[in-house]
Image (cartoon, rainbow, N blue to C red):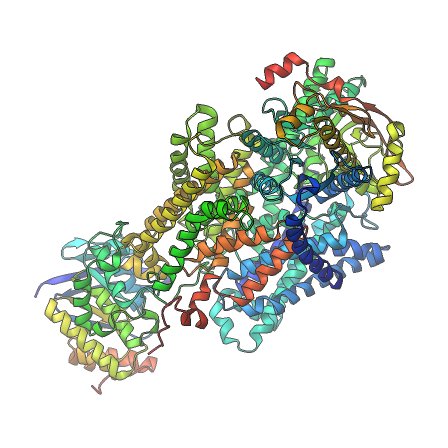
Amino acid sequence: MSTVLSVQNLSKAFGGVQAVEDVTFAVDAGEMRALIGPNGAGKTTCFNMLNGQLKPDSGDVLLGNRSILGLPPREVWRRGVGRTFQITATYGSMTVRENIQTTLLSHHRQINRMWTAARTLFVDEAMALLEQVGMVNQYDRACGVLAYGDLKRVELAVALANDPQVLLMDEPTAGMAPRERVDLMALTAEIASARNIAVLFTEHDMDVVFAHAHRIMVLDRGRLIAEGAPNDVRNNEMVQEVYLGSGAVHGVGSA
Amino acid sequence: MKIVKTHLLTAGIAVGLVAGAAGSAGAQTIKIGDINSYTRLPGHTVPYRRGAVLAIEQINKSGGVMGKKLELISRDDKGKPGEAVKVAQELFLREKVVLVSGSLFSHVGLAISAWAKRNKRLYIAAEPLADALVWSRGNKYTFRLRPSTYMQAAMLAAEAAKIKKAKRWAPIAPNYAYGKDAVAAFQKVLKKLRPDVTFVGAQWPGLFKIDAGAEVQALAKAKPDAIYNVTFGSDLAKFVREGKLRGLFKGRLVVGLLTGEPEYLDPLKGEAPEGWLVTGYPWYEIKANDHATFVRDYQARWKDYPRIGSIVGYNTMLAIHAMLKKASSTDTEKMVAAMRGLKFKTPSGPIMFRAIDHQSTMGAWVGWTKLVNGKGKMINWKYLDGAGYLPSDAEVRKMRK
Amino acid sequence: MGELIVTILTGLSSAASLFLVAAGLSIIFGVTRIVNFAHGSFYMLGAFIGYTMVQAIGGTIVSYWVAVLIAALVVGLIGVLMEILLLRRIYHAPELFQLIATFGVILVIQDVAKEIWGNEDIVSPRAPGLDGAVEIFGQRLPEYDLALIAIAPMVLIGLRLLFYKTRWGTLVRAATQDRQMVAALGVNQRWLFTGVVFLGSLLAGLGGAVQLPKGGADLLMDFGIIAEAFVVVVVGGMGSLGGAFLAAILIGLLNVFGIQIFPNSTLVMMFLVMAVVLVFRPWGLLGKPETPAATGTEIPNEPLRPAVPMVKVLAGLVLAFLIALPLLQELFPTVLDPFVIVQANEILFFVLFAAALHFIMGPGGMVSFGHAAFFGGGAYTSALLVFHFGLPFELAFPAAPIGAALLALIIGWFCVRLTGVYFAMLTLAFAQIAWSIVFQWTEVTEGDDGINSIWPSDWVTPLVLYYLTLGLTVAGVLLIRRIVFSPFGYALRAGRDSPLRSEAIGINIRRQQWFAFTISGAFAGVAGALFLYTKGSIAPTSMEIARSFDALLMTLLGGVEALAGPVVGAAAFKLLEDLFAASEYWRGLMGITIIALVLLLPKGVAGFAQTGVGRRLGLSRAEEVRA
């Protein structure tokens, strides 16, 4: 397997507080990689640096072998990094399919067309994506009335629309019922392997993490303290300490 | 709140009545359109309408004209030229007026005038002071009653020129065309009469937005012998108060355009400035030309004394009456012909509409302010006929092209 | 030396009243997110009521100040009345919708004040004990100026104590920082809002009452102060009292020194200051970036769909009527007099103007307070080309949208960096700057007298002009619709619905907004040119704040969420104006009608389609229920 995303010595401080410190890792194509850690460990900061929302103080982010450092999020996306958010971000004034179509229009650089009705463009592609996430039946509904789990699926379809090499998923299952969580992550894993996409996700639910991650990284106070296969991480003393210390042991050791 | 509600209710009914009346009045009357800024500057325009209504009532009482009564239909132009053009169209197309009259703001008057020219309708401008209205932008269908900015400024300048010690002048005027024109005209005439004067540190506060303390400071800094004031309304009140408190007027001659008009002088009450040379309207002392009768009738009708707006409104209607008598027709071309060179009598003296530029010879009163029984009055005033301050025929021809 | 000190003190004193008004505005906005245009009216009421109270009881030093305080309290209570009777019922309406309600209040208060206090300006007596002047190094300064200089910091300290030492104050601060918090406060929320409106209105009233000895009360005070108060709030930073204080002083000082150096700068000074501050500090001097600015429009959770058949039929009928109108008028002159053509003509170009604004306000989520700049910009482009170069109508008219678009391109470049109310205020600032250039550059623009006698070619008879207006307006509205449903429109809406997501899918939101702003400017320019050639004249009044607000009111009245909103809103607004035009009390009648409409149809007149009744009538699709 080939490395798609490599992160080298990434650091970021906010007014004296070191949010991320000297983080280095690499993710391979087709791999499901989890980034876990207690609240405030620096996961979201890390994510925001990967897709260009934040500028790191030092370090580099390489996509393939080209640096994407300093590019705005929209450019990072164009290079093939998709993203989903902890709180879903979809377009309320559009139907489910229009959400996907808008993304496809942007992907194909057609958003400056002013004459043709957008609704008639990339219909088949949009439907195919909805098919993949199991949302075909609801294509004409408003995003505002969808169940939360369905909304997450729409977001996944949006994130897949530009054929990404890397998918960043911030807390993909937050706010979902347990049953839905498993379904969504199973779906993600399936798509990732079928399309050979590298998925990097943060997650609080350890059941989800240990069930789907190929490898797991643990972040604590901005530093990467462990990285390895699920079993290695589970048995890592430092990890146990961090989680016991913070009192937030979910599924560690039980999965 | 109760009073208010009733008023609004009556207003609502009034709307209905006006709408109903419009259809039924028929050809029994000759309708005169009236456009003015009734909500933007009611302090000036409401007296105007009262003067106009009084004149119409008197004309109708004495039999009207051409066997018909006159009917005045008023509209608010909201201080916007576009709105004024629209109500002019409404008055002609819906109310079937024979002419439109009135208006106060120059930009409004100029817009109506341009429309009147295009549509070949008669417009008798009452008060817009812009010189352009009858000169550089004058046209066949527009006539103006009041002496223009240039005329009034020239009158003041002629009087001010007589005061030898005033050599260094500082003007203050609202920051818009009227203010600029008033300063330019005054400067031009005064310099012609007195080559030794200089003008320093002109101040241009925004209209009705004066920061009086700051303006007074700035004027004092220029150390003038004399001040030429063009501010009016709430600006004037603030300017006078700050100027007095800060000693700006001490030992200085102040000349004020329009300052002596009751609209602007009376609200100042006991704080009215003393010893200013001003144009204004000493209605309480004018006796010639049956002016006293006008004052009596006006007070009886409105339980209020006349302002400068009142006499202008009154005279405007007298002009229309005289014109209709002369024309014996409501055909626009015939009315225009009758307006040219029209002579008629008014409480302010005989007036003529010059054929060459359609400006009337109505003049202005120039005098000195003084506190009398805690009220600002004009003393040692004289009426200056407008005819003496109008450009020559050659000049007019050059301007009107 | 003395001169400098007195000049500085003069600037400080003129800042006092402005600070009080701005502080009130800022507090109300901070908590309720209501852009309260009626705030200037409360300032005016403070002056009038203060005058009446002073006349009644204010003979001595103590009773004078008691009178001032009573006036402030009464105005505060009037504010409470407005909150309970009006605002409270429409907090759930889209943001900024309350703005039209407060506009209705302005109109009503204008007529009420005129009825009670009469037409003439009121000059108030001086304050007892402070009616003289003091000498400072040989320069005289009114004693009352010193009082004003003391009052502003006293009020600031009082407010800080209130906000930091009381529980109520803590709640207010929490609510200012985080709107969501307010919802979590439960039952207190209602009275928190009422209390805040009371305090804010009281400050406005106090501002009006304390300036009495500097001048008095008149009927133009309300509009005079409101723009300035907004400038102070925005320059200082929304919701920041210290910022408002600083900004008021800054503007007071700049004014007093500015007019000594550039006496002509009076009209534009404060808007220049605001533009500069906003360009370099987008959240004002002391504002915080994270303070959520009002987005202006609520993000709808219903998809925007093409019109349902019923609406298309209705629109077709209206269009057929408008096409047939000149013929109908000739056939039935007793029912339809020739003026109806003029009315229809006027409604049409305002529809186009409102539709242009709606394009950026609705789908774009950008509220412009300065769209008259482009309306006037288009009109002046044509007028100047005719006036200076004698261009014929056929060339000057099409130049209007180009001129307006260029102006929008320049102004938009600065504005799209900002969002929400800051965006709105920057558009206002640029519009005022554009206005003052037209107003003061007399050699080129003929100044405030305007340019007259600009008429279309002879072949464009009034009838042809009517059809031209109808054609261009219909084409414009349809074209805007087309763009809204095109990929460009989707990307624009995407930027409004979720900036985060849009950036994450490769959409350059600013660029999209900038182009949309320019397009909107071009359409507004066409409306302006139609106005010019219908009226034959153009003056700076067509670029002033009031004209911008006309478009804003029409759009809001119609309903921002509906694409038909600006069409319905402009028509309703203009028809109401015409209905009341003959009445001396048109303002009061208009105000009451607007308030009634706001209460009855909180989603706007066109929003009626989305009510239960509207849906049953087939005006819009059945609502989807949440799964």
Work out whether residue B250 or residue C585 is closer to the camera in this orientation and state it: C585
Q: In this rendering, does residue B330 appear at all?
A: yes
Q: Which quadrant would residue B117 be assigned to in this image? A: top right
Whole-percent x and y of residue A61? 21, 57
Work out whether residue A1 or residue C399 is closer to the camera in this orientation and state it: C399
Q: Is residue B399 left or right of residue C143?
A: left
Work out whether residue C492 or residue A176 is closer to the camera in this orientation and state it: C492
Q: Residue at x 81, y 17 (%)?
A: B162
Q: In this rendering, does residue A87 appear at all?
A: no
| C273 over C307 or under it: above or below | above
Whole-percent x and y of residue B320? 72, 32
Q: Is residue A185 left or right of residue C400?
A: left
| C25 over C8 or under it: above or below | below
Q: Quadrant of the N terminus of chain A?
A: bottom left
Q: Residue at x 45, y 54 (%)?
A: C566
| B262 over A146 or under it: above or below | above
